[in-house]
Image: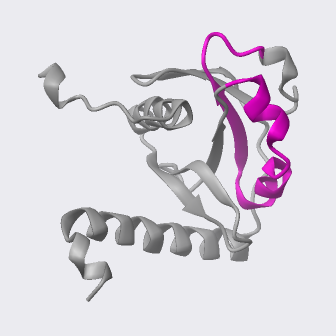
């Protein structure tokens, strides 16, 4: 790969999100970053799996970032599995043991602890899947035609 084409995101959390997205894509998931839920909360990574499952991954760049996060429990009703993604220097013992854990960097990621499955109700799954599809289609359109948003 031409390294000059590898533009790293500026923020540490965005770098983790990129590595997580690459790893989830390799597992057959369709990941998207910065997905806004109906509650107005925004998740770092949401991924639609090959069987229709929805995973949420919250990326944390350090102790202070984790301690400042007061909204993560609001994500639990909007996914089948919830994960934290952290780098190798993160003190993983801070993270709740009943959640999933992903070790990531800007290039890849590895699931260290599988999150417990809490299946969504059918109606919520349908609504979330449709909202996910609409948001990701809008993101793709914005990349292809940035001026479409202002027309």
Q: Residue 82: say if magenta.
A: yes
Report the label total: 0
Residue 99 visible in this rendered orientation of the protein: no
Horizontal relation, residue 105 to residue 149: left or right: right
Instruction: Identify the residue at horizontal 63%, vertical 41% (top origin).
Output: 57
Q: Which residues are magenta?
A: 62-91
The one nearer the camera, 114 or 21, is: 21
Q: Residue 53: say if magenta.
A: no
Q: Quadrant of residue 10?
A: top left
Instruction: Identify the residue at horizontal 27%, vertical 70% (top origin).
Output: 141
Horizontal relation, residue 148 to residue 33: left or right: left
Instruction: Identify the residue at horizontal 80%, vertical 60% (top origin).
Output: 77
Q: Position of residue 149 (x, y in %)?
A: 32, 80
Instruction: Identify the residue at horizontal 11%, vertical 22% (top origin).
Output: 2
Q: Quadrant of the C terminus?
A: bottom left
The one nearer the camera, 117 or 2, is: 2
The one nearer the camera, 90 or 28, is: 90
């Amino acid at each position: 790969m031409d390294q000059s084409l590898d533009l790293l995101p500026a923020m540490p959390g965005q770098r983790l999100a990129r590595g997580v997205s690459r790893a989830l894509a390799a597992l057959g998931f369709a990941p998207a970053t910065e997905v806004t839920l109906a509650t107005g909360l925004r998740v770092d990574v949401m991924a639609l799996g090959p069987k229709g499952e929805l995973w949420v991954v919250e990326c944390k760049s350090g102790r202070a970032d984790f301690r400042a996060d007061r909204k993560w429990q609001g994500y639990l009703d909007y996914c089948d599995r919830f994960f934290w993604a952290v780098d190798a220097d993160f003190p993983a013992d801070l993270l709740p043991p009943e959640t999933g854990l992903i070790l990531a960097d800007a290039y890849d990621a590895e699931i260290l602890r599988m999150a417990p499955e809490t299946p969504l109700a059918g109606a919520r799954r349908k609504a979330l899947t449709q909202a996910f599809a609409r948001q990701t289609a809008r993101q793709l359109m914005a990349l292809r035609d940035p001026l479409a948003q202002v027309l």
